Amino acid sequence: MVLLSWFHVPAKRPKKGKLSQEQRELNRLISKVRISAENAINRIKKFRACEEFFRNQPSRHGVIWGCVAGLVNLRWQRRLHLPTT
């Protein structure tokens, strides 16, 4: 089994112990990244084409996901007032 190097698990507090300041900071950083990823998945799931069972041709599955991801990114950029390229 191969573990990816970018995969980190938050540190768990030992029984009757405390986490070090480094471990607490690392846990905060991990949670920030996790929350950002969960919010992005939630934005994609708002489109019914990605939330429900896919009933179209299997060859179009990637195209639909690409279109939804593009629309989500465009909406997010406009909300943050970022320049679109």
Image (cartoon, helix red, strand yellow):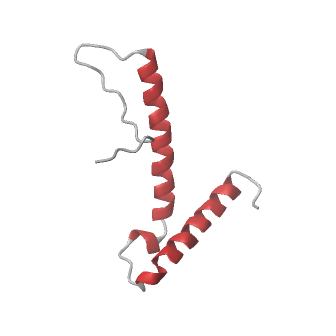
Front in this rendered view, residue 62 or 3:
3
- The residue sitting at 68% across, 56% down in the picture is 77
17 lies left or right of 84 = left
The structure residue drawn at horizontal position 50% and vertical position 71%, both measured from the top left corner, is: 65
- Give the vertical position of 42 relative to 9 (above or below): below
| Vertical relation: 52 (above or below) 32 | below
Compare residues 49 and 63 and report the one nearer the observer. Answer: 63
Question: Whole-percent x and y of residue 8?
Answer: 40, 37
Name the outermost residue toward the bottom: 57
The one nearer the camera, 9 or 3, is: 3
Quadrant assignment for the C terminus: bottom right
* Residue 83 x, y percent position in the rendering: 77, 56
Q: How many marks?
A: 0
Is 28 situated above or below 4? above
Residue 60: image location, x then y, percent: 48, 81
The residue positioned farthest toward the front in the image shown:
1
Residue drawn where x is 63% and y is 56% of the image: 76
Where is residue 67 shown, x and y percent of the image? Answer: 57, 72
In the displayed structure, does residue 51 sit left or right of residue 63?
left
| Residue at screen point 46% across, 57% down | 42
